[in-house]
Amino acid sequence: MTPTLFGLLIKAALYTVLISGVSIVIGVTLGMGVAAARLSSRLWLTGPARAYVSFFRGVPLLVQLLLIYNLLPAVGVNVPSVVAAISGLALCTSAYQAENLRGGFTSVPRGLLESAEMVGLTPWQQLIRIRAPIAFRLTLPAIVNEAIIILKASSLVSVVGIVELTRMAQDLDTSLYKPLQLYSAAGLLYFLINRGVASFGRWIEKRMSWGRA
Amino acid sequence: MNFDYALVISRLPEVFHAMGVTLGIWIVSLIGATLLGFAVAVGRRYGPRWLDWILLAYVELFRGTPFLIQLFLLYFGGPYAGLSLDAIPAGVVGLSVYGAAYFSELFRAGFEAVPLGHVEAAQCAGFSRLQIVRRILLPEMTMLVLPSAINLAISLLKDTAIMSVITVPELTLTISALGTEFYAFVESLFLLALCYWGLTEICSGLGRLAERKLSRFRFATP
Amino acid sequence: MTAAAIVVKQLSKSFGETEVLHRIDLEIAEGAATCVIGPSGSGKSTLLRCVAFLEEANSGVIEVFGAPLGFTEDAAGRRTRLPVSKIRAVRAQLGMVFQQFNLWPHMTALGNVSEALKTVRKMPRAEAEERAMAQLRRIGLESRAGHYPSQLSGGQQQRVAIARALALEPKIMLFDEATASLDPELTGEVLAVMRSLAADGMTMVIVTHEIGFAASIGRKIAFLDKGRVLISGSPQEVFGKPRHARIDQFLDTYLDRGAAMLI
């Protein structure tokens, strides 16, 4: 494993992190919307939201990626493959994040909302000022977990031609015939990235600990 | 889109065969993963310190890297290390080892979750270690672990799709190949998505049913 | 005759099949503390929560300074729900302190006290924080202004909760078992704050287990049993001998430090 080879893999790994990062951010934001729909009292929102969550959690990510990648051009939407890939990742993770966030929202103790009610906060203000920040904090470990899952799942976008870490290793293998070294190196890089994300997650949790040790 | 029903019907057997491959691989891998995962959990809990370390490394590596990379290592890299596997066996071995890492964590949590009081009571009554595992830990653990185990099993079912990349003739490979053949790629992908959606929903439903039926065995959780 | 701050008329509340409050009539006088006491399950917290409109009664009316809260009932007993703005307007005169404190964990003490001033009263930040600091000073916790609830003792948290309610200058303060979650050593500091509020002439409705405290601070005591007001009157009327048999029974089974004071 020469330095230049490893260098190529590292560059591809950075691309993996970039793609994953954007997908996670979009996914969490989308997930919040879906969670809100799930929690609302209006049936025309909860029904589709449940179907959405069920679909994106029930179909393998690979199939979802293939579907988006081929569906968009078929209906006339021409975007770069990476946009399709990110959309696929984001939609899939948003369903899981929605469930996580929903759990977080319902775990916010009712008393905190009652005291907000008594000092005059409107339901909307309660949601924005009290419920959402606390729910987010409660959901944080699950969100970090899901981020790690997305980083691993991003390996599948190699199938739709994106040259991220997995694809780079594959491409190098076709000319070098060193699968053991290449895929081990790629695996190691994924592993290290995931460790990094886990540490980052712990750091954020500490910053949001609000005085607790 | 030309919907030539006769043509579609004539290829249906292939689809069912592919579904059989998917489900077959899934079930065999599940059995492998549960057994191996349980062995790992037991080894870590009751074995010597050095074994715990080795098994911890295994669990962390296989949970911390993509399944696709693991498959590539096994299928493409294996021959260079003297292990030449065909696609289907590679898929089964890959999914079993991958799933076992996750199952071992489930079982580990299950062991910890059995109330210490129950174990101590058995110890006082003179049960041997083996008897405690068989008569107390296993039954109680099974109930505690069941919901997460069902979720894990369903997620492993979805992971069988990834094997299509190493040419395992399961559902994804077969249906998308048919799609290319009929110039109906997008439609075939929709069909594929629906197949999996249906399968996972059915399995979830069965899982919930199993949980309900077995709930009478649930001991009081502390 | 002092004016009535709150009038409760024929209030009934059921949770499903269980009737928790049965046709309660109660008057809360202005400028004094009214203490609601009684055994567990008597409905005292539910009564307070209905007055705060955190629970909706099934029948009956609540009037705060003459204005109906939540529902109006006509002569035939038909209830009309008032618009949200009306409900908010009446409720704005109430401040509430909870058994579980209910401080928001992601805000400092100062943040908790100033939040409503900023968000509801739309005060500029500096002004809101100044007012909040003044409230914290009043209860002696200005040094803790930058601390999070998790860094405060139970007694301190409850005092911050009181400051939070007072910051909005309510006319009536409601206390729902304010010291029940506190370790005994910490109840003193909270009761002291409540006493000073009473001394300043705040109208208070206090649901409490602290019988001695209730007897000493309350101008009126209401004893609730199984959802009905068994007795209400001055502490002397309720606790003085000869006592109602049920009160005797209640005091007997109820170990209270301050009960000895009442003989």
Image: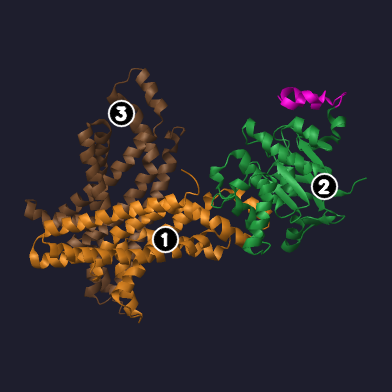
**The disc labelled 2 sits on which kind of residue?**
Val
Q: In this rendering, which labeled residue sits more in front, label 2 or label 1? A: 2
Q: Secondary structure at mark 1?
A: helix
Residue B167: quadrant of the picture: bottom left
User: Color used for chain B?
Assistant: brown
- The part of the chain drawn in magenta is C240-263
Q: What amino acid type should be assigned to the residue bearing mark 3?
A: Arg
Residue A15 location, x and y as percent? 27, 67
Q: Is residue A62 magenta?
A: no
Residue type, mark 1 in image: Ala
**Type of secondary structure dominating the magenta stretch:** helix
Asked if disc 3 and disc 2 are in contact, CB closer than 8 Å, the reply is no
Residue behind mark 2: C8
The number of callouts visible is: 3
- Subunit that carries the residue with mark 1: A
A61 to the left or right of C86: left
- Residue C237 at x, y = what percent? 88, 31
Display colour for chain A: orange
